[in-house]
Every structure is written in C-alpha cells, then in structure tokens.
Image (cartoon, grey):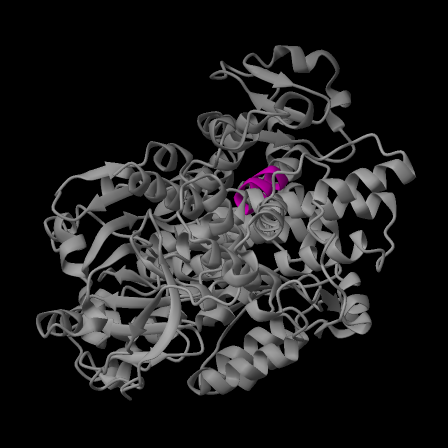
Amino acid sequence: MITHTGKKIENKAQSVANGISQKKTSEELSFQFKNNRPEAIAQRRFQEIVNNSSQSKQAVQLKSNVYPHTNHTHSGSKRGKHLDSTVIQRFLDPVTDQEIEIDTLTPVLVNHYIEMEREGKLQLETHDFIRLYAKKLGIPVEELGQHQVEIDARELHQMTQTPIAEMDQEEVSLLIQNEREGKLKLSTQEFIELYQRDLDLHSKQNVVYIFLNRFPIIRIFIPVAQGTGHQSASMALVERIKALGYRGRIQIIYQEGFSRLAEEKAKGVDNRSKLGLLIPGFDPQKGPEAVQEIDALGFEVMSEGQFTKLKEGDDPRAAQVPLGFTGAIDDRHPELKDKSKTIPEQLGVKHFQQFQPLDWHPDDGRRGVRTAGNPDIAPSVSLETSRLGYVYPAIKPPGMSDDAFFMQELHDNPGFKGEIQAVKQILAAPGGRMAVHSMAVYGATTGVHSQQAVVSMIALVEGIMHAQDKAKMEKGVVIPFIGSLADPAKYAHEEDPGSRAKAIQQEDDSHFGKIQAETNDKRVKIVTVGADFEVAIKAIQEVQKNEVLIIQFPKKLPKKVFDFLFARTTLPNASEGANTVDKDRQRKGAYLRVGKSAGKDYPGRDQIGPHGVEHDVNIDEQAAKSTRISELFKAEVYGRLKEAYQSNEPVKYFFELYQLDLEVYLPPDDRLTQYGSDKKQIEGVSITKKTVKIKGLPKPIQTPKLLHDMAIANPPGSFLGEFILESMNPESPLGRYFSRVKHFSQTHDQVQIGIAEIERILNTQ
C-alpha cells in the first residue's frame, strides 16, 4: 500500500545519479551511471518551473486544456449506455496526432512525454507540465510540493523477496526511491543489480511499450488457413503485444469460411470454430454476426463480414485506426493473393504489419509493412534474414499449482475431460519427480502419406528404445501422439460424423498395430484416449521402466493444455509446425522435426552466432548433425536404411550411412582394438577412438567381420537414440548447441523489431 506523509519534497528532485554517487562514496564503488533518465530530467525541469517562474504558484491552480469527451453509443455492445460528457485534460501527441488523456497515462508514458517536452518534441504549457508531473508522483496537483510517496514497510519487505531480475518497472522505481531515502539497505551487489535492471527496463521493453500505448485500439487480422497454425501464430502475436504492456483494446477480425482441406469442410471445422480453442471466452456458436467482447482480456472479436457492416454503417467501432497486424498470412494463397494487397483498406488501418511464424519462407508471405493506398509491401530485411518467431509468455500464472491449472482447464473445457485428465497423469510428479519420461508428437502426418508417418513413428520408437537401453533409464517412456495417422480425406464423403470417426479410428488402430509389431510388441503398448479415458490413465500408471507407451489423442487439445504438455515433457518433442518448434526452442531447447518438415535445417551460425562460437560449440557442425538426424524421419530414408541393416549386408548398410553422413558409435568396450592392423585395410573409413565415420565410398573391404560387428552395435534406431541422449546432456556439444538455440529464441523477438520499424515509418512521414 502506498501512503502520503506530510514531508515536503524540496530536495526530492535529486537525480538517480546523485543517489548513486553518494553510494559510491560510502562504499568506494568503481562505477558511475550518467543520469539521463526521464524521471531525473523531469524533476530538474519541475524545480526550474517551481523555483524560477513567478507564475508557478498560480499555475498549479489553473485548469488544463479541456475537451468535451463523450462515449459513443454502440448498438449491440455491452458498452451501449450513453455516458454524460466529462471534462478531462488532453494534449496532442505530435507523432500520432492522437489526443492523450493525462489521467489515463501509465508511469512509463508519463516519463516519456516529460522527456519529449524537455527535448522540444512536445510543446506543453507550464500548467500542463505540472499536471503531468503530478500524475507521475501520483498525487493531486493541488497538493504538489506538500507530499512525498512512501511505501508500506510490509509491502516493501514482500517486494524485496522478488528476485531483482524479475521485478517490473514499478517495483524497481519504488525500491530505488526508498534506497535513496535510506529506507532500504542493499548490499553492493544488490545495488548494482537493481540499477542495471532499471536501465534494462528503460532501454528495451519500454520503447515498444511507449509506442504501442499511444494507440487506444489495435486490430489483428486472422485469415482462413488449414489446421490451426496460422491462427495460433496470430494469437501468439496478441499474447506478445499484451506482454509488452499494451493497455488498449485489441479488435480481432477473423476471416469467415473453410480452408482448402476437404476433410475440414466435411467435419464442419471452419475458421470460427478453430478460434474457440484459441481465444479464451470466445464462443463460436454465436455465429458470424456476433461482436463478442471479452472485457477481462481487452478483446473485441468479430468476423470480417460483420466488421464491414459496421464500417458501412459508420459505426465508431470500425473507424480507421493507425495500426493493424497479423501473425501469419500466405500471400500466395489463391484466396489471399489479391486480398493481401488491400488489407489496410479492408481492415480500416493506416499501417498493417505482416509478421510470420518461425522460419517462414518469404515466398509464402513477406514480413513487412503495408500502407493504405499502396498495394506493395515494404519488406523487413532484418526480420526476413533473422527468421525469428515469437516470444511466448508463461503458460500459467506464477504461483498457480499444477492441480489448480488443470482444474481451471477442466472448468473452461468440459468437453475435453478425458484428454485433460490424461495429460495431467502424464505430467504427474509424485514427490516432485515425474513417474515417466515423455515425448510429445504432433504433425507427423502433415504433408505426408499415412504409411510414411507410420515409418517415422517406427523410427522414433526404435530410437527411444535404444536410448532406454543405452542409458539404463529407470522410468518408462510415454509418447502422447496428438492427431491421427489415418488419411481423413478418404472419409470426407461420409456424411454421418459418427460413422466417419469410427472408420478413421479403425484405420488408426491398424497403423498403430503395425508400429507395435515392427518394433517390439512386448515393450511397446498402444492406447487411445476416448470415452473410456480411464483405461489410458491406468496404462500410464502401469508403464514399466523398459516400456514405451503411445497414447493417441484423436481430438485436438485446448491450447493451454497442449502448450503445457509440450513444455513439461522430459525428452525432446517431435513436431512439424513452426509454432510448436518455436515454443520448444524457447522452453526446452532441443526438438525433432517430423512430417513434411523432417530434414529441415536447424539454425546455424548465421542465425544464432557468431560470438563465442569457437570456444563454446561449433554451431554449424551441430546444426548439420541435427538436420541429418531429422532426415531419418523421412520414410524413404529410414526405410532404405532399415532394409539394408536387416539384409545382413554390412557394405550396403555402410553405403547408406555414408549417404547420410552419419557417425557410427562403437560398443562401450571399444572392440576395435582386437582387429589390430585390419582397420588400415578399410579404405574410406575414418576411425577415431569412439566413432567410425564414412568419409568416402568403400571399396572391396577385407574385414567384413569388423563391419558386421559395427552394424550390430549401430542399428538404424541407434542414431536417433544417441541424439536424444546427447541433447539431454547440457555439457555435450549438442546440449550446448541447443542451450544456445534456447537463449537466442528467448531473447530475440520479431515483434519488437517489427514495431520499431513501424515507429520509424511514422516518424519519417
């Protein structure tokens, strides 16, 4: 609780630098901060006004510029009541031409406008400036000069329990103030960390925070697209904008209709129904005519058709606004090729920023800014070359227990009771330690045929079993498989949903049965989460340490449950979609690519280097290695490799390994020594202490027994297994590589870069 005391603020305008200087004198610190922060500048400016202006005492009694302010009446809106006009203080932002209400400004924005006034970028009357500074101090303007802010001792104590690196701007500012006034004792290290945190907050996030909060409304466009990847990317953008501190209203405008996938149309899965899983509080059953206001999140959701009607009727909710965004869009999509050129006009925005998911190919959709009246996009070179994704906030609020999280999800998604209970059981941690290892799989059938996806799953299971045996894992492995191995297009003609679901499940059962038979039917078990979900929960509870349990989730999971599952699994997840990989990079580091993305490049030195590369880890080498391993999920690759291995032809097998440039791991006892000089007769094979790598095509080989023994120790699944184990070891080259990937993904955000580019465009107009 913040209270006011009766002390005057005559000397309160001392700068942060003065406080630091005093601290340095007493503790002989060897550093010094230059005081150019807005609050210190504002304090000096205020003192000049108070001390030098003969009119200053009268100024605090003057009224600021006033404008009549009336809330518009929106038909069909919860805010439909007409409010009486009130008198508020306003001034014009010189960059955006937006009227700024002093009473609604946040502390960071107050500092920003004080700094603009000092630099001559904003012209304020003296009495306006004093009102702005009174807003900064959080006291009535009439009491300015009579009070100072003091924090309650209990609240101060609670605040100091928060790690400094996790404090927000308000907490940091209050602690700095109390430290300067002698109410808080800090060690030298704490003192340095506190001021460094203050500088970081000002120099990074606040630039974007200040810019965004100049606009009371921002619009987000969500186009039709197959699956939920594009829609998820746009909601990730919304989450990021909110996390950056945006306090205004976000209007989400979604395109109506079905994607080109016949099975989605057959199932009745249109764009609106997909948003029901992605937007908390959004009800797709209300239809495209509804304007749904989710006040708790500051959202206003409507279809593009409804927005057009509002615009044609001159409804103020559809009035032109400066900024619009999308989190993903295909410029080459037949339905969007021409439409994307006029999105600013259709969306009623002056500037429209196109973001794209992680690693999105420029030909499918450029990152950049579209301006109303101009059909061409101004591409963002920095975003295209970085191939960045989004920075994701925490899945559940700090302090919320896992049980509370799942209870909330059960309340919000009652139709997914079985799925949520199964995920909860997979992640159960009795005594703080999970009972099983887990690796989630999503998108294995995306862009490939069912039989190809089956081979990919065989590769994955055999890799896991190798890792289990090699590391002598004490826990069984559970693989949550989200989706279906069947080809839904074959059943699009089936009109009855029940019959269609039954036919798809029968094909799934056949495919998973083949996986079980091809691997090891005694160690591998399959179960489906359906109406009898208790069977799946029991299977999870009973899985043994050398077993692999595949749990199929035929239905899509609610977004938060899906994200929570992927964030908490203990082994690298396998997925196709860019959004899921983006989250895995940030929350886990290591990941595998399946579906049509199998064999896709992992980030190299050009993206996450080059500093610290040589003495830390060879980024390009580990990226290439990860890409080679990902190639094994291609059915034609793994199938060919397995056929050569099972044919008992070591030369043919090693030829396939050469084609993939894979390392062959020798048995633990290094039996290479028993062959003596024979190893010299293997031309084209490079032998190190622990590995054999095929460097060239082998000629007739004199030692087939050596190759045979090597093949026995290195079945096709062993390469995936070794990858899994090495990626889990933070000290290994692969572990250090994925640590670098994780750090880079957590700290580099395309949203901040893109918004900075829009600000540059506005400032140069």
Q: Looking at the rendering, which quadrant does residue 731 occupy? A: top right
Is residue 742 inside the magenta stretch? yes
| 588 on left or right of 110 | right
Is residue 595 inside the magenta stretch? no
The answer to whether residue 175 of the structure is visible from this angle is yes
Task: Out of 26 and 675, give the one closest to the viewer.
Answer: 26
Residue 28 x, y percent position in the rendering? 89, 34
Q: Residue furthest front?
A: 54
Instruction: Please give the name of the residue rendered at 14% of the width and 47% of the height, measured from the top-left corner.
Output: 341
Magenta extent: 738-746
Instruction: Please give the name of the residue rendered at 19% of the width and 69% of the height, measured from the top-left corner.
Output: 318
Residue 481 x, y percent position in the rendering? 47, 65
User: The C terminus appears in which quarter of the rendering?
Assistant: top left
Task: Out of 593 and 326, give the one closest to the viewer.
Answer: 326
- Report the label total: 0
Residue 704 x, y percent position in the rendering? 59, 24
Instruction: Please give the name of the residue rendered at 29% of the width and 48% of the height, measured from the top-left corner.
Output: 353
User: The N terminus appears in which quarter of the rendering?
Assistant: bottom right
The answer to whether residue 506 of the structure is visible from this angle is no
| 16 on left or right of 22 | left
Task: Out of 660 and 609, give the one closest to the viewer.
Answer: 609
Task: Out of 308 and 265, give the one closest to the viewer.
Answer: 308
Image height check: is 341 above or below 317?
above
